[in-house]
Amino acid sequence: MSLTKTIVSRRLANPRSIAWFLCLTLIAATCAAWSGLPSLESSPLLRIALFAAMGIAMLGTVFLFPETTDRNARRLILLAAILLRLVLWPAPVSDDVNRYLWEGQLVAAGENPYSAPADDPRWESRRDATWQAMNHRDRPTAYPPGIQGIMAATATICPSLKSFKALALLGDLATLLLLFRLMRENSAPLRWAGFYAFNPVILISFAAEAHFDSLMLAALLAAILTASREKKSAWLWLGLAIQIKLVCLILIPLFLSKKSIRSSWLILPILILPGLPFLTALPDWIDGVRNFASESAFNAPIFTLLASTGLSLNAVKTLCTTAFLTAAAAICISRWRGLHLIDSILWMLAALLACSPIVHFWYLAWLLPLTALRPSFAWTTLSITIAGYFIAWHTQETLGWWGYGHGIAAIIWIPWLIAAIAQHRFLLSKWLGRPATGRAGGVSPPDFALAIVIPALNFDPALSSLIQTLHQELPDNSEIIISTCDPNFPNQANTRLITAPRGRGNQIAAGIAATEAPWILIAHADSTPRPGFAETLGSAIASHPRASLIIFGQRFPTSTFLTLLIEALNEIRVVFGGVAFGDQTMVIRRSALEAAGGFPAQPLMEDVEASMRLAARGDVIYLGQEWHVSARKWEKAFATRFLLVIRLVATYQLARLRGPAHATAVSERMYREYYPPSETEK
């Protein structure tokens, strides 16, 4: 009740809240339309439009999320997630669920589902309506013994398709709750849970079609959570995830460490015991798994690309297998050298999907809880473009066969590839470049030395308030440096004043040179920190020992729909592109900055340049604990300024391709355009 009162009384008229509820309403409307379709085969072109609309609206639920406390954010996301899933309850389930029910009843009756395919004459007495609705009755089952037991228990308790939908939803909501815990431990903004909770892949895979992959995700997240706490039970949870979905087998090497290897034997009983009741037919199950893995290609990026060149199917399979094994080896080596468990699992599953011969749309769900912790431009883009998957039913309706050609697959996957290149364009430089010293481990708050550099041209009364707040929050070993080009700038209590050449980049570079602190926070004079920002920063430094740049984010004190657009675009640029603006409050690791060649002493675009340099030396972390910054520069001629900023950023990034000297010269020209003599730089 208190949450409802807070939202209604204080935030209903806020543009951010209005925009968020509109996005949520759009998702709910598309879910209702989806539920109204009578079967999976009906209206495939409409399904494509509905799915894509959900994906676009999902972005709005993340980047337009209302300003509220973490506790209220969890409640709001959970409540909205439950409501959307209830809207999808009437939707028809996947034909896979018929197999869940049929095999579950088979196991419950004491039969061995691995002993023969579903269309074998021995099962003739069990050819009921569920059997008729199954797919691939001629193929041996590939489901592991563990999930067979779960399906048997579900079929015994309530032998209906809806019971399996309830089971899928149980795993789905358990995954969301575990995701909240992981987000807190990894200093991730809670609103990023929307990448999972409101994603069309998740909504349709679990709430509509009832695939049991949600149970695997819940077990996997439990394994990650317990492993992060160095608990032996991580092996039990990982074993359960494998017993639900064999794909998790490839993750075992990533959980191995010097401490955990001694307890790794705990996974063996979970892998062995559920298979004992089916022991006589386990070789047939292995053949079923092998048969499933050798299916013909469908909707697979690398497989489709290679097949389109005319190579034989065996050659394509060999190349894809080699590519995956090479990638897996590199990921394992990186993990053993310190890559975070979450990142390594995300890369491993991504490599598997990229190299697999067949990718159904719900396979993307394996990655999506992790992309809520590590937002991915590529997989978020694919969560929208995978809407094209449903054209397979249109092909069946019009041409008589299920699927689609290479052209449709290219439309689905090329945006994914472009987004991946854009987000990970610094990856090779990060791997090959000289590592920044001090990246091996983190520190605990508040034991980190921090210097705050504030570039200022003219005195702003807000500066005194900022300095007072900083002193109240910061550890005693911190220092505040005001860097100005005005020799008559008034002194501020408990700060150090230095002079530098005109231009914010020049002033920041001088401020950084004046301190030896291992971390430098760059603040605008008109910014207002969030309460507790120092503790948040200390926790982030401890959680992300490989971070080179940490960004708090930016909000305007009062919001309009136009300034809301700026806030959202700024956040998207950092989260998906790793490039920050100075008014988003950047915190820089000195060792990474020195390894990247130092802070760019240029009058404009120094923030963009510094971001790109630091992205090549470590991880860029967005905290989502935005500081307020004055909106006065956007109050006049909004459209003119908006287009100017876009043009200047694009011009600078193109100039950067021609070399540092050219980029610096362009920066000088852009500074004179951005700050004409009639204006002052704030």
Image (cartoon, rainbow, N blue to C red):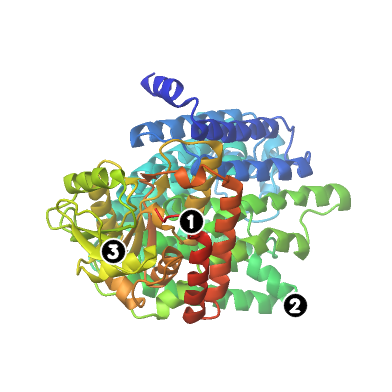
Residue 393 place in picture, x, y as percent: 78, 48
Q: Residue at x 63, y 54 (%)?
A: 116
Query: Which one is nearer the viewer's eye here, 258 or 669?
Result: 669
Question: N-terminal of the two: label 1 or label 2?
Answer: 2
User: Mark 3 Cα within 10 Å, few/some/many (few <14, many 20+)?
Assistant: some
Instruction: Examine the image and state in which quarter residue 477 appears.
Output: bottom left
**Seen in the image, is 164 located left or right of residue 462?**
right
Q: CA distance from mark 3 to mark 2?
A: 44 Å
Residue 223 place in picture, x, y as percent: 35, 52
Instruction: Examine the image and state in which quarter residue 224 appears.
Output: bottom left
Instruction: Identify whether 661 is placed above or below 379.
Output: below
Q: Callout 2: helix, strand or loop?
A: loop
Split into 4 quadrants, where in the image is the N terminus?
A: top left
Q: Which residue is mark 2?
A: 309
Which circle marks residue 678 in the picture? 1
Question: N-terminal of the two: label 3 or label 2?
Answer: 2
Query: Which one is nearer the viewer's eye here, 557 or 240?
Result: 557
Q: Amino acid at mark 1?
A: Ser
Instruction: Identify whether 39 is placed above or below 467.
Output: above
Q: Which is more foreground, mark 1 or mark 3?
A: 1
User: Disc 1 vs disc 2: Cβ atoms closer than 8 Å?
Assistant: no
Q: CA distance from mark 1 to mark 3?
A: 45 Å
Q: Callout 3: helix, strand or loop?
A: loop
